[in-house]
Image (cartoon, rainbow, N blue to C red):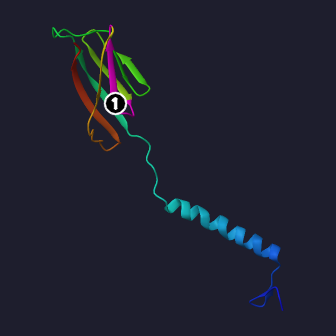
Amino acid sequence: MQGYYQGAMLSPRRRQVLIAGLASSVAPAVFAALPTVEAPQKLLLSGRVVGPDGKPLAGATVAAGRARTLTDADGRFMLITATPHYRVTYRARSTEGMVSNPSPDADGTARASIGLTLA
């Protein structure tokens, strides 16, 4: 007789409901087993910007990703970003660079310090 499954009668509609229920209970486990993409790690970028004469450049803009700051009176800066690419600008002069292979510490924050002479 059609519609029998191991001694129980299941209509086509009931089969769809059972299959859908099984899929919804298995799907979260399947997605949990997939590798996760980690969020970008934090990079604490600090340093000092000086001019060609070796004097500190106060008020230079240091930008990395969306983070941006100005150097202090001693040319020093510190910012937290998620990108190793940075740009320093001071009175129509600028330079770009990249921190290579910053290694993160236990909390996932990498630290890098740079010294720049802006000619």
Q: What is the span of residues highlighted in magenta in the rendered image?
A: 81-91
**Residue annotated with mark 1:** 85
- Quarter of the rendering containing residue 4: bottom right
The quarter of the rendered structure image containing the C terminus is top left
**How far across and down, in percent of the image, does residue 82 sit?**
39, 34
Between 106 and 54, the residue placed more toward the observer is 54
Instruction: Find out whether residue 59 is within the magenta segment.
Output: no
**Which residue is rendered at x = 45% and y = 57% of the image?**
35
Amino acid, disc 1: His
Q: Above or below — where is 67 with respect to 32?
A: above
Q: Is residue 70 left or right of residue 48?
A: right
Relative to residue 48, is residue 63 drawn left or right?
right
Q: Position of residue 45 (x, y in %)?
A: 31, 28
Report x, y in % for residue 86.
33, 26
Instruction: Choose top left, top right, bottom left or bottom right for residue 8.
Output: bottom right
Dominant SS of magenta comes to strand
Q: Position of residue 106 (x, y in %)?
A: 31, 44
Quadrant location, the N terminus: bottom right
Q: Is residue 107 above or below residue 21?
A: above
Give the residue displayed 26% in from the left and 31% down from the top. 112
Residue at (66% x, 67% y) in the render: 23
